């Protein structure tokens, strides 16, 4: 019971801090999420602007949709509004996100009317931009799976079998690190992600 209360209190505090961030601190605080593994494009640790990311919702039961890509997790009913759910890790070419009590939906399409959501492993709280610095990631150990939707779309667009990584990964806005140079995050550009040609290309 105490663990359940602690989780509820954490979610309430996070919601309150997100509200403050959206109202007056949009340029100073970013939401931290975990998704996928370190070798996927952008890695495992992500930051998103609360003003762009919309609401964070617990994972409800998802309605499967036939004849869709494996990374399309299904349809979620959030208070009577249907959201199409993309598994963020699987979309980048990784394994499907485990569906646990800590899994979350990021309702990134709530503001623009697209009603799209990202399935992520967990939401970890807020990071203050003042405590972070932009970095050059250098040679990235991450790789793009040949089966990832962006890789397939780029090959089809180029017509020569090459993967245009710079265009493909435009939704990675920046790389950020803590002042001590230890922990690193990728700053997710939500509008660029929603504009990616393959993002809602869910049909097989």
Image (cartoon, helix red, strand yellow):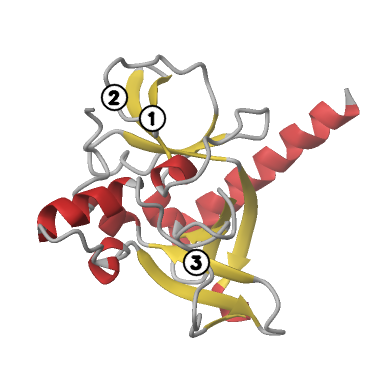
Whole-Å distance between the Cαs marked 2 and 1? 7 Å
Q: Image quadrant of residue 164?
A: bottom left
Say above or below: 191 vs 183.
above
- From this view, report whether residue 1 is shown above or below residue 140: above
Secondary structure of residue under mark 2: loop
Q: Nearer the viewer, mark 3 or mark 2?
A: 2
Q: Nearer the viewer, mark 1 or mark 3?
A: 1
Residue for badge 1: 70
Residue 26 image offset from top left, x and y in percent: 44, 64
For residue 15, say whether it is visible: yes
Residues at marks 1 and 3 touching, judged by CB atoms closer than 8 Å: no
Task: Give the residue pinned by disc 2.
Answer: 68
SS for tag 3?
strand
Percent position (x, y) of residue 187?
46, 66
Quadrant location of the N terminus in the rendered image: top right
Residue 25 in view (yes/no) = no
Disc 1 to disc 3, how far (Cα)?
Answer: 24 Å
In the image shown, does 144 or 169 lie closer to the viewer?
A: 144
């Amino acid at each position: 019971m105490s663990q359940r209360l602690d989780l509820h209190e954490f979610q309430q505090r996070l919601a309150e801090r997100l509200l403050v961030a959206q109202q007056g601190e949009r340029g100073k605080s970013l939401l931290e999420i975990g998704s996928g593994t370190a070798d996927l494009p952008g890695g495992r640790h992500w930051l998103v602007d609360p003003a762009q990311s919309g609401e964070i919702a617990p994972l409800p039961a998802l309605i499967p949709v036939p004849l869709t890509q494996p990374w399309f997790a299904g349809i979620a009913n959030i208070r009577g509004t249907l959201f199409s759910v993309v598994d963020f890790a699987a979309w980048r070419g990784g394994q499907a996100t485990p569906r646990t009590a800590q899994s979350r939906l990021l309702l990134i399409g709530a503001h623009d009317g697209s009603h799209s959501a990202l399935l992520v492993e967990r939401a970890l709280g807020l990071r203050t931009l003042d405590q972070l610095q932009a970095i050059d990631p250098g040679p990235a150990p991450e790789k793009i799976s040949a089966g990832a939707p962006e890789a397939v779309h780029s090959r089809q667009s180029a017509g020569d079998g090459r993967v245009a990584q710079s265009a493909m990964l435009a939704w990675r806005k920046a790389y950020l690190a803590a002042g001590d140079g230890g922990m690193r995050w990728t700053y997710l550009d939500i509008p660029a992600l929603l504009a990616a040609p393959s993002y809602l290309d869910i049909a097989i």
